[in-house]
Each structure stands twice: as C-alpha cells, then as structure tokens.
C-alpha cells in the first residue's frame, strides 16, 4: 500500500513533493523512531531541501499526524471493501459475522503487508504528545464506527451477544488487533547490537521481547476468541 495524497490546492508537482515527504517520513520514523528522527533526514530521503518540509507541514508532529490520517484512510477504504465482499459470496454478504471475520483478517493482512506503516501506526504515534493529547483522530473514529456497526448488526440479528455495548466491544476487539500488531512488529526487529541496545528496543514497548508468530494466521485466532471465547467448560460438561 503506497502513500497517496492530493496536492494541497497546489500544482501536481507540489502534491508529488508532499507525497514524497510523507513516504520518506514513514521510512525514517520506522527506521530511527519518532524522537530520534530529524527533519533533515526526512528531507534527504525525500530528495528535497530541509526548508521544503515546512512548506507543507508545521512541525515533525504535524508530519506524523498527516501520515497517520492518510494511512488510516487507506486502511478504512480497504476494510470497507473487505466487508462489502466477504468470503462466501452473496449469502455471506448479508451476515455481520462473516463481515466481522473479513474485517479482522483484512486488518491483520495489512499489518503483514506494510510493516513500516504498521510500526509507525502502532509504536511511533504514541511518542507524539501532540497526537496523544490534542489530535481529534477522525479517521480512527471512523474505524471504530465501522467495527461497532458490524457488531451492532450482529447483535440485532441475535448472532452476537448483546450484553456488551457495541461501541465497547469495538474498542475491545481493536485492543486485541493493536496489541498483536505491536507484538508482531517488535518480534520482527533485529536483535540488539552495540548500536541498538536492548534498552532502546524496550523503550518502545517495555517488557519481554515478543516471540515471532504468523500474524496472518493470527486473524483466525482472533476470530475464534471473539466468536467462542476461551471457556470450554460448558462444552466439556454437555452430553
């Protein structure tokens, strides 16, 4: 998934520069981390002068937020397409459960296909105080509405448990997806060297280094957990 953006009311050439800057920022943030990244590095990667960055973005925080907005819009577009045509054909299209499965699988497939973007979205955004405290986050709100709508539809049809409010269930499911994406990204990072200390890695996500796993296959695990849970006691006791 390539970063695309429209020119800010300027020429096509200007739009191309903005898109190049955003693509360079994503690579530099993923490679160096948001705090360590310098605007001069982003400019060099994008092939523009340092001052050109500030023609399009007020600050490094604004650049990160713009990158998030574009990426999340692309994510939402892919997820809408996935739930519009879930596996199974026309019959499956009418089922919120099949749409929910398609949503979860499409999201984790995106993480797998775009690891640099996944790192920025799961790790580096948390390093920006402006993003965490000031940004209203409309694209993420759209993501939650889409997910919550699937859950609410399933509850209305009696296919999903209605005791948990749909908007709360949506955040719970996103929490699972976000943590899986974070663990997968961290597990893919190289082992610490003299240049990259263990402290530098744990600073991004304190705790035990995650073990490697197949995040595409993990989509089935998330679906199973959401649909049936971990409790097998009732099944074991039933005749």
Image (cartoon, rainbow, N blue to C red):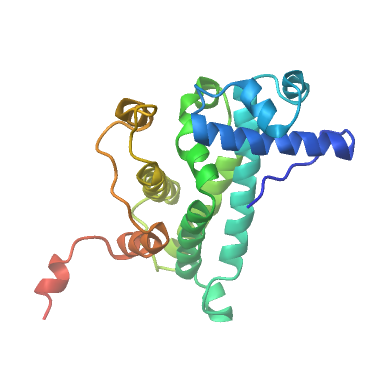
- Please tell me which residue is depicted at 30% across the width and 60% down the height of the picture: 225
- Give percent across and percent down for residue 16: 80, 39
User: Residue 23 versus residue 123: which sits nearer the camera?
Assistant: 23
The residue closer to the viewer here, 228 or 152, is 228
In the rendered image, is residue 31 in sight? yes
Check the picture and name the quadrant holding the C terminus.
bottom left
Where residue 2 appears, x then y in whole percent? 66, 49
Q: Horizontally, is 218 left or right of 64 in the view?
A: left
Give the image location of residue 204, x and y in percent.
38, 30
Front residue of this view, candidates 166 and 51: 51
Residue 7 visible at all: no
Q: Residue at x 45, y 35 (%)?
A: 123
Q: Residue at x 38, y 48 (%)?
A: 184
- Indicate the position of residue 193 as horizontal and vertical percent values: 34, 32
Q: Residue furthest front?
A: 194
- Above or below, comparing residue 39 to residue 164 in the picture: above
Q: How many marks?
A: 0
Is residue 29 left or right of 175 when viewed as pictured?
Answer: right
Q: Nearer the viewer, residue 153 or 97?
A: 97
Please say if 68 is above or below 147. Answer: above
- Going by the image, does 62 lie left or right of 124? right
Residue that appears at 61% across and 57% down: 78
Q: Residue furthest right?
A: 11
């Amino acid at each position: 998934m390539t970063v695309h953006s429209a020119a800010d009311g300027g020429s096509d050439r200007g739009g191309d520069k903005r898109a190049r800057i955003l693509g360079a920022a994503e690579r530099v943030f993923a490679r160096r981390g948001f705090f360590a990244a310098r605007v001069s590095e982003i400019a060099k990667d994008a092939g523009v002068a340092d001052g050109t960055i500030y023609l399009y973005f007020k600050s490094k925080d604004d650049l990160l937020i713009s990158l998030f907005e574009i990426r999340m819009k692309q994510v939402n577009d892919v997820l809408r397409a996935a739930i519009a045509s879930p596996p199974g054909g026309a019959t499956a299209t009418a089922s919120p459960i099949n749409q929910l499965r398609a949503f979860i699988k499409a999201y984790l497939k995106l993480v797998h296909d775009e690891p640099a973007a996944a790192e920025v979205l799961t790790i580096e955004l948390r390093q920006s105080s402006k993003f965490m405290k000031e940004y209203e986050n409309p694209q993420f709100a759209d993501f939650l509405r889409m997910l919550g709508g699937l859950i609410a539809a399933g509850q209305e049809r009696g296919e999903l448990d209605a005791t948990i409010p749909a908007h709360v269930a949506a955040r719970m499911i996103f929490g699972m997806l976000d943590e899986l994406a974070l663990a997968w990204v961290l597990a893919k990072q190289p082992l610490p060297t003299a240049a990259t200390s263990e402290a530098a890695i744990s600073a991004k996500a304190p705790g035990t280094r995650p073990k490697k796993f197949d995040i595409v296959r993990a989509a089935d695990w998330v679906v199973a957990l959401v649909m049936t849970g971990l409790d097998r006691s009732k099944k074991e006791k039933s005749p």
